[in-house]
Amino acid sequence: MRKNLLLIPGLFSLFVLGSCHTGTDPKLARVKHAIDVAQSQLELSSAEFDSLPGFPRSLMPKFKVVDAKDWTSGFYPGTLWEAYRLTGDEHLRAEAEKFTARLEGIQYYKGTHDLGFMVFCSYGQQQRTLHDAHSAEVIVEASNSLISRCDSTIGLIRSWDFGEWNYPVIIDNMMNLEMLFWASKYTGDPKYRDVAVRHADLTLKNHFREDASSYHVVSYNDDGTVESRGTFQGYADSSAWARGQAWGLYGYTMCYRETGDTKYLDHARRIASFIMNHPRTPADLIPYWDYDAPDIPDAPRDASAAAVMASALFELSTLVPDKELGRSYFDRAETMLMNLSTDAYLAPVGTNGGFILRHSVGHLPAHSEIDTPLNYADYYYLEAIDRYLALRGVAAQEL
Ligand code: GLY
């Protein structure tokens, strides 16, 4: 079904094994099938939403469609860009540009820390694909908006403006730092990077427990001392919410890539160890929505957490000097990716509202988005596929 296939430059080279043919490699055959499913699903959903405002976010069981200010607004355009790069499907590229343009005004929005998700997953992917100046300008402006949320005494970017907390910072916020590193590299101005590094350092100090699991929400007093540690979307204040562990793993892996500071690498390794050795991990490695959910083994799984973890572990596998350890991260991520790419999680074409993966959890304590597709599960799933193919030394058009 794919057409006009692109040559995708490999991101990594550690495990380059030479090109393989899907006929002789069942893992590559499974990935090829997943890309075909993604292409078909995105053709369906983009046709449905082409003339409607907003972005598809989930099924609950009806479509949840969100506007540009929703924290997930960048994922659907970003998924279209990823799918375009994997398939060369020019129609998907046109849709990607269309949906990305819907986010133009959000660069000036200062009401959330989620600007990294919203802008770097959409305009960031557009810039990565087209190398266009306009996307770069939008990303820099969004970075200005994001650093405006950093109080100079507290030293972290404030996450939310709602709730009873004095100054809430959530582990998810680590993901928004990638845009700031990019903005400093692009502009040559270190101010974005400086905010990102301080935020990462203070999060490392205050967000993590002895076992490297993280709290979801840490709130700060005005003098920078910790007001409280707890959760919002997890099972309990003391529990390990699965997606939070995934955000932390991905965030510190990315911080090491961007800075070369080994304390971030060490921390990413500790989080990976927590995840990979957790006794309440199911056989297929797709985590329950919270590692401490009381109804395990009947608790819902979170495919979104698995997709983020797999993508992060692929990258971490390239960054650790210990080759054996790197291989263990790669193997783990590969197994997770293969399991996500079975009928248990991958949607049959024409179902699932056009989303690619099934069985994620948004906000269980709020009874919201339980066992549903989520647009960010799809985004990180395609990113994981892209990283996997690069590590295998296989271009998508060879599949
Ligand atoms: N950033 C919100 C979430 O992970 O659900």
Image (cartoon, grey):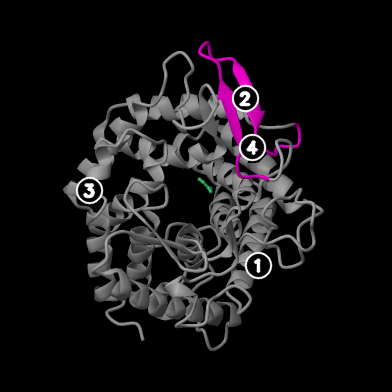
- Residue farthest to the right? 279
- CA gap between label 1 and label 4 equals 30 Å
Q: Residues within 10 Å of mark 4 (few under 14, many from 20)?
A: many
Is 229 covered by the magenta stretch? yes
Q: Which mark is residue 335?
A: 1
Residue type, label 2: Lys
> Which of label 3 and label 2 is nearer to you?
3
Question: Badge 3 local density, few (<14 within 10 Å), some, or many (20+)?
Answer: some
Q: CA distance from mark 3 to mark 1?
A: 38 Å
Q: Name the kind of residue labelled 1 in the image.
A: Thr
Q: Which residue is mark 2?
A: 205
User: What's the magenta region?
Assistant: 210-234
State the CA–CA distance, disc 2 to disc 1.
32 Å
| Element marked by disc 4 | loop
Q: Whole-percent x and y of residue 219?
A: 57, 25
**How far separated are the C-alphas under marks 4 and 2?**
17 Å
x and y percentages locating residue 102 in the rendered image: 24, 55
What amino acid is at disc 3? Answer: Glu
- Which amino acid type corresponds to the residue marked 4 in the rendered image? Thr
Q: Report if residue 143 is visible in the image.
A: yes
Answer few, some or many: residues within 10 Å of disc 1's Cα (few below 14, many 20 plus, some between 14 and 19): some
